Amino acid sequence: MTYDLKAVRLPVLGPAGIRAVNAMAALPGLGSLLVRRLRHDAGLDALTATAVDEAPTYTPMLPDVAPATPALDPREDDAREGFRFPTIADYHAAYRTGTLTPLDVAERFLTQWETSERHERPLRAFISMRRDDILTQARASNERWKSGQPLGVFDGVPVAAKDEIDQAGYTTTVGTKTLIDAPPAARDCGAVARLRAAGAVMVGKANMHEIGIGVTGYNEHFGSARNPYNDLHHTGGSSAGPGCVVGAGLVPLAIGADGGGSIRLPASHCGVVGLKPTYGRISERGAAPLCWSLAYIGPLANCARDAALAYQVMAGVDPEDPHTFGHPEPITDASSPRSLVGVTLGVYWPWFRHAQPDVVAANERLLERMCAQGARLVEVDIPELELARLAQLVIITSEMTTGMWPQMRDRLGDFGVETQLNLAIARASSAREYVHAQRVRTRAIAHFERALSTCDAIITPASGNTAPRIHPSGGAVSDLGRTIETMRFAWASNLTGHPAISFPAGYDGAGLPIGMQAIGKGWSEQLLLRLASFADAVVERRKPQRYCAPI
């Protein structure tokens, strides 16, 4: 088959240009013509022009048998090249030895955050944070440690959560002004509840790209989160705050949400590990209704071991989320393999190399290290990627406009200008396009299952580029070509339901992080985490420009 993903080059609009287009899009007659042109430029006309005979798949259900994980010889040490971020084990050791208490760490966390916000370029990692709540949780953890009854390795560890998921006592705004006056959540979402029950200190609602409809992390209302490796650059989105706080070392772990790369893109751009699990593996109860059939919750962490620990806690059956039923038991471990003998990695070279030169070079170097340590490489073919990309785009934007319809109907002008433009394009999709996209999903799942039948994981870059610069004005930018480039490898596993992970692969010439992605068979999170753990041991890490760890 012929590789068909396209590089799109279209005019880049700054804040004034976006406002002008929005004004024209609101005009009778002219507005519909303009939106039709924008949709054409995005390639959406090609979706329904392709005949698809398959029945639609409305949620990505995969074979319900976990694949066998290759037996890998574990390392006993935790050796890592270069700069070493503090891990959950380091927090646990500090509390166990009495070097620090959870209250010490909570107070240091608050001091570091306040310092970062007084900087001339504040990190803007959080939308909301309650000092009293954080200190109350820390004091409770202190008492458990004093009595010799900690709840486990997470007890007293600070954890942030994206403002797309409920946290008791906080309003879930999904990064938009239209929901800022909504009542606070009465209880935690499933993932937060599980980590809190394990003793984690939940430190607030992390920033995000408004309603998740963008990939940079830009937010007109709360300020854009800044990249800890270069604070003139974006973090990637939409889990911008989680990527920022983990990348800066402010917390060792954050909870993100991913509809088209929103965990893995900020993980890649901020130099951390981000896991999007198999569809339904982690409960979506308490998540904002943005993109039901493409939505995933997962961890961002500074190392694969911590991502594995968090996944093990968060995954499992939730009686209030039927999509969590019928899965094999989550199995993982936190060990780094000495070698990758027994692992077969698949590469679709035209896709793999369709990225910025520095991104390709860093990923090829890491792939060579993997093969030098025993991994077997096979070439795979994945047809109709462009068709699948368009299907994912129609599904996510259709579901977003449905989920946000009350706000769009009553308060459209309160959305940021970039979001208004994206919504104008999104709401022009038809029911026919949506159903057709779900038929394409059926075909895409089959294509990826066929490729994965020859290998254990498909390897790609995590993003086609490194983090883009923030506009000098701090305002919105509409750059469709860069958006497609950023998402080039990320959207596919949201559509198909397969698990995928991003982990550090190196840095570009300007020192910005580069990520590698591994896409696995359904329920192969254990293998993906061990691939990331292998990379932890061989890829040299660098200290971020804005480093603010509380221990």
Image (cartoon, rainbow, N blue to C red):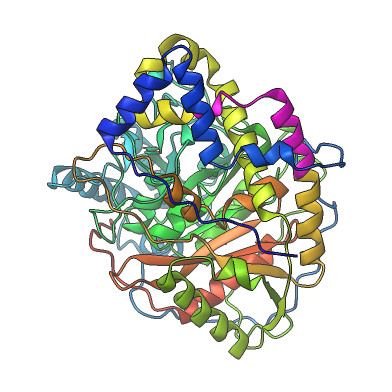
Going by the image, does 517 lie left or right of 382? left
Q: Residue at the spot x=75%, y=61% of the render?
A: 521
Snapshot quadrant of residue 175? top left
Q: Residue at the spot x=38%, y=43% of the render?
A: 217
**In the image as oriented, which residue stretches furthest toward the top?**
410
Quadrant position of the N terminus in the picture:
bottom right
56 or 70, nearer to the observer: 56
Residue 335 location in percent, x, y?
59, 73
Quadrant position of the C terminus in the picture:
bottom left
From this view, report whether residue 179 is shown above or below residue 110.
above
Snapshot quadrant of residue 204? top left
From this view, report whether residue 478 is shown above or below residue 368.
above
205 or 235, nearer to the observer: 235
From this view, report whether residue 513 is shown above or below residue 436.
below
Going by the image, does 278 lie left or right of 273? right
Residue 482 location in percent, x, y?
42, 51
215 or 443, nearer to the observer: 443
